[in-house]
């Protein structure tokens, strides 16, 4: 059950994070979904304990778990695009 919740939350938060960071492109859709799922896992293990609340990896969805998954997706997306930019130079 928790895997399905993480997939759904991760996909949604990855898409929202790509809109906020303005990195949405046709070739980046799959990457954004993967980043969102990775961000949900990062948020579950690192961000949720800091702000309190149940992580999305626990199988529950509340406001704090969504916010932490969103922040985690932005962090992971930023790291990936930082390395992509360095590789292009």
Image (spheres, rainbow, N blue to C red):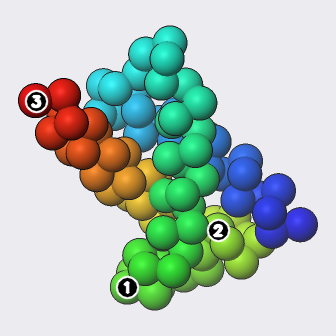
**Mark 1 residue crowding within 10 angstroms, few (<14) / some (14–19) / many (20+):** few
Residue 25 higher or lower than 3, as above or below: above
Marks 2 and 1: in contact by CB < 8 Å? no
Please name the residue that numbered disc 2 is placed on: 56
The foreground one among 16 and 83 is 83
Residue 52 appears in the figure: yes
Q: Quote the CA–CA distance across marks 1 and 3.
A: 36 Å
**Mark 2 residue crowding within 10 angstroms, few (<14) / some (14–19) / many (20+):** many
Image point (89%, 66%), residue name: 1
Q: Quote the CA–CA distance across marks 3 and 2.
A: 36 Å
Residue ranking furthest to the left: 89
Classify mark 2: helix, strand or loop. helix
- Tell me residue 72's x, y (percent): 42, 60
**Mark 3 residue crowding within 10 angstroms, few (<14) / some (14–19) / many (20+):** few
Please name the residue that numbered disc 3 is placed on: 89
Q: Where residue 62 is drawn, which disc sits there?
A: none
Image point (69%, 64%), residue name: 61
Classify mark 3: helix, strand or loop. loop
- Quarter where residue 5 is shown: bottom right
């Amino acid at each position: 059950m928790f895997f399905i919740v993480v997939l759904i939350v991760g996909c949604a938060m990855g898409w929202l994070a790509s809109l906020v960071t303005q990195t949405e492109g046709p070739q980046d859709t799959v990457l954004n979904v993967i980043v969102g799922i990775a961000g949900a896992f990062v948020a579950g293990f690192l961000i949720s304990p800091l702000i309190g609340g149940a992580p999305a990896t626990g199988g529950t969805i509340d406001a704090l778990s969504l916010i932490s998954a969103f922040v985690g997706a932005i962090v992971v997306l930023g790291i990936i695009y930082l390395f992509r930019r360095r590789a292009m130079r």
